[in-house]
Amino acid sequence: MKFSTKRGSPEKRATPCIAVGVYAGRKLSAAAKTLDRASRGNLSEVLRRGDMEGRLGATLLLYRIPGVAAERVLLVGLGTEADLREREYRDAVRAAVKAAQDTGAATATLCFTEIRVGRRDAAWKARQVALVAAECAYRFDYMKSNKSEPRPLANVELLTTARDAGAAARGLSQGQAMGAGVSLAKDLGNLPANVCTPGYLAEQARKIAREWKLGVDVLERKDMEKLGMGSLLSVAQGSRQPPKLIVLKYAGGPKKAKPVVLVGKGITFDTGGISLKPGAEMDEMKFDMCGAASVLGALSACAQMKLKLNVVGIIPATENMPGGAATKPGDIVTSLSGQTIEVLNTDAEGRLILCDALTFGERFEPAAVVDIATLTGACVIALGHVASGLYSNKEALARELLAAGDEAYDRVWHMPLWDDYQEQLKSNFADMANIGGRPAGSITAACFLSRFAKKFDWAHLDIAGTAWKSGKDKGATGRPVALLTSFLMKRAGKT
């Protein structure tokens, strides 16, 4: 799908479909009023008949309106004007794009930058148009013998004023890059685990590096053994798939500028190991590498936008499988940091690979480190499927990520990381246990990781409840690519 901005009066725009808003109470938006005047009250007459009330997300398609150059006029319900915020704006955009897709039109022109959304500017509104449109256009049918018929809607235009044209064009370009990163993360998450192996993730990293001229290193098992990554390697023991430690480097800033390091959990399939998971819905454990996918998506978007900062992506990738060589509950392993860990539950494996990756990240002397992981079911219980969990050892970094989540409408909630919870990780036989019991499971997992992040500003995003959907809409969401990209944009001075 291609995006562009256009200037001019809506009634003169010769387009297959033009979308304008209607507020609750049958109140026309500014662009709709212009079309109404040009058509000598045609739209007002339609509203008087009761065909459109302005309910949020409702649509009504009109053909060949007199005095209007567009072939079709799409009326889109915006809901109550005073209540229109970020969610409502995105819902209206989604309704407009989906309705336009169903018309058979190749191009849709949206008059949506004029809609007031709190204090959001034209760039924000344009970014959201691109992100939502990319979401509507997304299909995953690579593994099907009968592919979906391509949707005819190939172009989305944003009609804007001369004053907003520059900001809208910039926002569309940024949103398109973010949308491509989200789609990449979705593709990787949706692939089955017999295709998306640790080796496949490494090849995708190399492909991204070639496309955007990034640096890439892939450490093999022998390299990790030499370094002393006993914690990461303990998770890989039961699998026939060789583990990988993938390092992707984007150098858009000054050579000596400290990089932001993103660490993504890359468990390409999680059986739970010897602490075997229940069989029901175990197929969804292919999504346990969505943290890794989000790092690749964010770096791809970052490179596409040519952000002026340095970013390093680190992805520890392995399967977690049972077997004769697999780590057993009660085993003690030595991490790269030298700290010893009693593995009381092999299904708490994400923290075991992340801790070594965090220690490995010290060598880059990072400005900040953010790890992203589908880490705990406890986070799903705490926050559901709306917000990701945020933990940090630096209040300023937490505030940055909270603001980035709000900016991208990919929201997080700041959770406590108090030392009181560290008590639950005590072990009689090692420096720490890898679990702290059922109470506050997401918090104690973050506390575990914090023990390996004392030398830098660090934040942890638990995306277990937001990385994918179950049921009839089963599939990866691509979160939190938009949040990470917004965070990097802010650091690069682009928002």
Image (cartoon, rainbow, N blue to C red):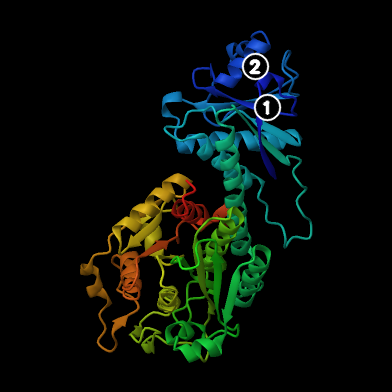
> Is residue 292 among what the camera can see?
yes
Q: Which residue is mark 1?
A: 18
Q: Relative to 33, does residue 275 appear above or below in the rendering?
A: below
* Image-based side of 182 in relation to 427, left or right: right
Label placed on residue 35:
2
Q: Position of residue 448 (x, y in %)?
A: 33, 73
Q: In the structure shown, which secondary structural element does the residue marked by tag 1 occupy?
A: strand
Residue name at image x 58 percent, y 46 percent = 175
**In the displayed structure, does residue 287 sit left or right of residue 212?**
left
Instruction: Say which of 336 and 266 sits in front.
Output: 336
Q: Position of residue 176 (x, y in %)?
A: 62, 47
Looking at the picture, tell me which residue is in the foreground, 193 or 131.
131
Q: CA distance from mark 1 to mark 2?
A: 10 Å
Q: Amino acid at mark 2?
A: Leu
Is 310 above or below relative to 331?
Answer: above
Expressed as whole percent of the image width and height from the top left, the position of residue 276 reads 47, 78
Q: Tell me if 106 is positioned left or right of 44 in this view.
A: right
Q: Quadrant location of residue 474?
A: bottom right
In the picture, the quarter occupied by the N terminus is top right
Q: Is residue 281 at least partly visible in the picture?
A: no
For the residues labelled 1 and 2, say whether their Cβ atoms are less than 8 Å apart: yes
Q: Amino acid at mark 1?
A: Ile
